[in-house]
Image: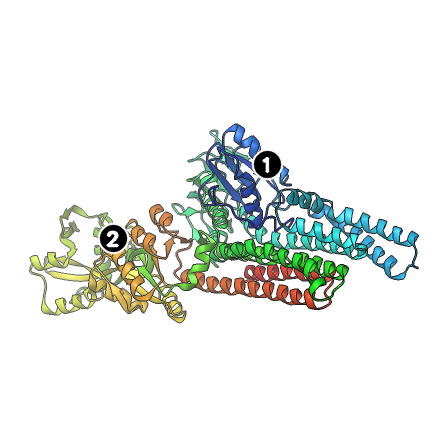
């Protein structure tokens, strides 16, 4: 974690990190050693006095900072950051956008310059520190051996701690307390009081622990980086002459035709124009099984074409693809501070100065009050300085949150910030929209029967041919449901026409037929008490009933309904098992609402709601139950999604307005992901507080040992960095769930 705990002071004058996009014209820089929230705070404090900075956009995962400022302010900002000990690498272009690769292709997310290449140097420092310890314990007493040991210790400190000293001295000159400053004082003090072997070992162990911690933290970052690797870097593009050419992804225009071979990754979002295949959409939607795709179907960039060759028309450029939007949203989500992270940052701002003052008191007062020697008191004060850094506390929160966000993204759950990841565990009720959320959102033929003496084999093709000619959604559902009843030899429909508000009519083989609603049959005088009873059964379930009739009477009827999603009932049961009350909100009539709610297992159902009524319902649920979520997919759901404590949008079927208003986007429209989000939130919260308890507990134990026991400097380093590694490893467990 190169230099995790840079500054424990917070600043407020510069706009805080938000999920807002980088401003066009802003200059973006890579800062290899900036990968921790307190380093962000340090840079903000450094830039605070500079006038003219319009905005700062930190991306700790990418280790980048975008500065929107006039040229003079920009130059001053770069100089100030450099003087604070941070190396900056400007990007070739401003970071105004970026697709699946745009925000990252200029660098590797892993800091090759400081982490891997530094390992031999640190190993050498550790070996020399061991030699210094051996000289101290084994060599005979005498000035030559002492000088030799001190020289070896100095070389070890130089190899392991040159950068620490540079940053530490800079911080001390600027009257800032950070881990570099604390380690500089502790190691220098230990050396001056004759503990030079321990000073060398402390610096070597500290630097190696920092390196190991950085590599561990990068695992969480690489989970996001893995999303970027899903999209290929080029595509097979059809040329005007009909031949195919491989071009870079960013050079593929909208509306172009690209080819995807079996086993290849689909490069961009598009619509299939030729071929059929099974597509593995797990990278984007989290679905476990491949989905069959044919002409007219939509596909996502980054998904895997498994069986047949596909040609598709590109519907979104690389920077606007679904995958690019997911990556961008996850990165922006990491820029939002989670509540626990804010709490820890506030604690850290007080903790380090407090321990520093205590260390000073131990050094100055204990010789007077407890009869300790000055060297003993000074040594104990130096031990306190080593444990004064809140590294373990500060690093545990972002690592845990990043791991949780990455895990959710892998499962097709796009959470727009650590706040929502933490707060989802508090939900006591979830309001579910009916159409498109609980149900498929499109009508389907769910039942039909011939009436009276009519033959099913004759009724079906007649109804299918009439329904084929109509564009009404109910007619389309009947046509699709009866697709198997048609044959090439069927007689055409003649004299076809629509009857407004009633249905359609036409002649087949010279016989007149109508396909219409209940009211049409009543007007034709073709309803009977028995038929009314049969229709009432379906209408009570919220189904739309269409009847086929000829000159002699009704031949059959067809029940159409928006069917419940396959996963809806199980999803509702999972919410109940978590202690969350499911409530259904819909603009549909009460009978239909009750029927769907009964199928889903929902007890509280509210129908005939306008958008403003749904908004009022959310407020009422918040008053009744407490924190309330809302799941929807339509424009009419947007006000309620915004009002809810956490809004869940169905990403596949949802409108852009609903997705923008929501806090969590479910990419595969599976309602089960709502309960999964709540479970992940509870696990994340538990891990966060495990880490806080672990970090504070270890520090409390060593604080007591340092003052009243026999804790040494190297033991304090092990305790501090060991705690950091433990909390990082604990946070990374979320990636395996």
Left or right: 425 with respect to 130? Answer: left
Relative depth, front residue between 561 and 684: 684
Residue placed at 63% from the left, 46% from the top? 110
Q: Is residue 458 visible?
A: no
x then y, percent, for residue 16: 47, 45
x then y, percent, for residue 710: 73, 67
| Quadrant placement of the C terminus | bottom right
Left or right: 247 with respect to 570? Answer: right
Q: Residue furthest front?
A: 368
Q: Is residue 724 visible?
A: yes
Neighbor class of circle 2 (other Cα within 10 Å; few <14, some 14-19, many 20+) is some
**Pointer 2 residue:** 611
**Pointer 1 residue:** 80
Residue placed at 19% from the left, 48% from the top? 493
x then y, percent, for residue 124: 80, 51
Relative depth, front residue between 260 and 49: 49
Left or right: 595 with respect to 67? Answer: left
Element assignment for label 2: helix
Neighbor class of circle 1 (other Cα within 10 Å; few <14, some 14-19, many 20+) is some
Of the image marks 1 and 2, the number of the one nearer the N terminus = 1
């Amino acid at each position: 974690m190169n230099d995790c705990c840079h500054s424990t002071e917070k600043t407020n004058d510069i706009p805080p990190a938000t999920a807002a996009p980088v401003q066009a014209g802003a200059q973006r820089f890579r800062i290899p050693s900036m990968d921790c929230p307190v380093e962000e705070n340090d840079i903000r404090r450094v830039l605070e006095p500079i006038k003219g900075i319009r905005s700062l956009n930190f991306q700790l995962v990418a280790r980048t900072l975008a500065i929107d400022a006039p040229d003079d302010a920009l130059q001053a900002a770069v100089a100030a950051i450099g003087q604070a000990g941070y190396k900056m690498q400007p990007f070739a272009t401003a970071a105004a956008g970026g697709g699946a690769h745009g925000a990252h292709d200029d660098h590797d997310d892993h800091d090759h310059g400081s982490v891997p290449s530094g390992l031999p140097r640190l190993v050498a420092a550790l070996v020399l520190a061991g030699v210094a310890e051996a000289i101290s314990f084994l060599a005979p007493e005498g000035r030559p051996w002492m000088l030799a040991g001190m020289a070896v210790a100095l070389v070890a400190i130089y190899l392991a701690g040159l950068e620490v000293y540079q940053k530490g001295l800079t911080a001390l000159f600027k009257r800032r307390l950070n881990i570099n400053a604390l380690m500089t004082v502790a190691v220098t003090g230990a050396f001056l009081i004759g503990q030079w072997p321990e000073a060398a070992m402390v610096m070597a162990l500290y630097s190696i622990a920092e390196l190991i911690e950085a590599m561990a933290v990068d695992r969480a970052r690489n989970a996001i980086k893995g999303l970027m690797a899903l999209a290929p870097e080029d595509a097979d593009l059809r040329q005007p002459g009909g031949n195919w050419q491989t071009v870079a992804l960013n050079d593929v225009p909208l509306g172009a035709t690209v080819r995807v071979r079996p086993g290849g990754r689909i490069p961009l979002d598009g619509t299939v124009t030729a071929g059929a295949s099974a597509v593995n959409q797990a990278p984007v939607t989290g679905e476990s099984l491949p989905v069959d795709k044919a002409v007219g179907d939509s596909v996502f960039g980054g998904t895997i074409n498994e069986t047949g060759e596909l040609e598709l028309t590109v519907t979104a450029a690389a920077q606007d693809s679904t995958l690019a939007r997911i990556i961008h949203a996850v990165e922006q989500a990491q820029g939002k501070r989670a509540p626990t992270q804010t709490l820890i940052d506030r604690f850290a701002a007080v903790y380090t100065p407090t321990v520093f003052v205590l260390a000073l008191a131990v050094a100055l007062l204990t010789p007077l009050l407890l009869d300790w020697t000055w060297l003993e008191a000074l040594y104990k004060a130096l031990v306190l300085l080593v444990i004064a850094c809140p590294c373990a506390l500060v690093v545990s929160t972002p690592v845990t949150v990043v791991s949780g966000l990455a895990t959710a993204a892998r499962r097709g759950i796009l959470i727009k910030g650590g706040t929502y990841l933490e707060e989802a565990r508090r939900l006591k009720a979830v309001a579910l929209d009916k159409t498109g959320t609980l149900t498929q959102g499109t009508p389907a033929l769910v039942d039909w029967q011939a009436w009276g003496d009519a033959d099913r084999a004759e009724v079906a093709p007649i109804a299918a041919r009439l329904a084929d000619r109509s564009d009404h959604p109910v007619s389309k559902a009947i046509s699709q449901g009866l697709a198997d009843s048609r044959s090439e030899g069927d007689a055409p429909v003649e004299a076809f026409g629509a009857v407004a508000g009633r249905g359609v009519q036409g002649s087949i083989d010279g016989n007149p037929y109508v396909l219409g609603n209940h009211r049409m049959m009543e007007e034709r005088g073709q309803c009977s008490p028995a038929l009314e009873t049969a229709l009432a059964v379906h209408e009570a379930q919220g189904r739309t009933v269409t009847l086929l009739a000829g000159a002699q009477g009704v031949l059959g009827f067809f029940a159409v309904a928006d069917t419940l999603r396959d996963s809806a009932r199980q999803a509702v049961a999972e919410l109940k098992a978590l202690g969350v009350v499911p409530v259904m909100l819909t603009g549909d009539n009460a009978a239909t609402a009750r029927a769907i709610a009964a199928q889903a297992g929902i007890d509280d159902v509210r129908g005939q709601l306008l958008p403003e009524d749904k908004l009022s319902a959310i407020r009422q649920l918040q008053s009744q139950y407490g924190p309330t979520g809302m799941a929807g997919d339509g424009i009419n759901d947007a006000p309620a999604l915004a009002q809810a404590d956490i809004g869940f949008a169905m990403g596949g079927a949802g409108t852009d307005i609903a997705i923008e208003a929501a806090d969590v986007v479910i990419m595969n429209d599976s309602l089960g992901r709502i309960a999964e989000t709540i479970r992940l939130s509870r696990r994340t919260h538990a891990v966060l507080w495990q880490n806080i308890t672990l970090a504070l507990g270890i520090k409390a134990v060593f604080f007591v040992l340092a003052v009243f026991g026999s804790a040494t400097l190297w033991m304090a380093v092990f305790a501090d960095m060991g705690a950091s590694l433990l909390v990082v490893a604990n946070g990374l467990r979320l990636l395996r769930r």
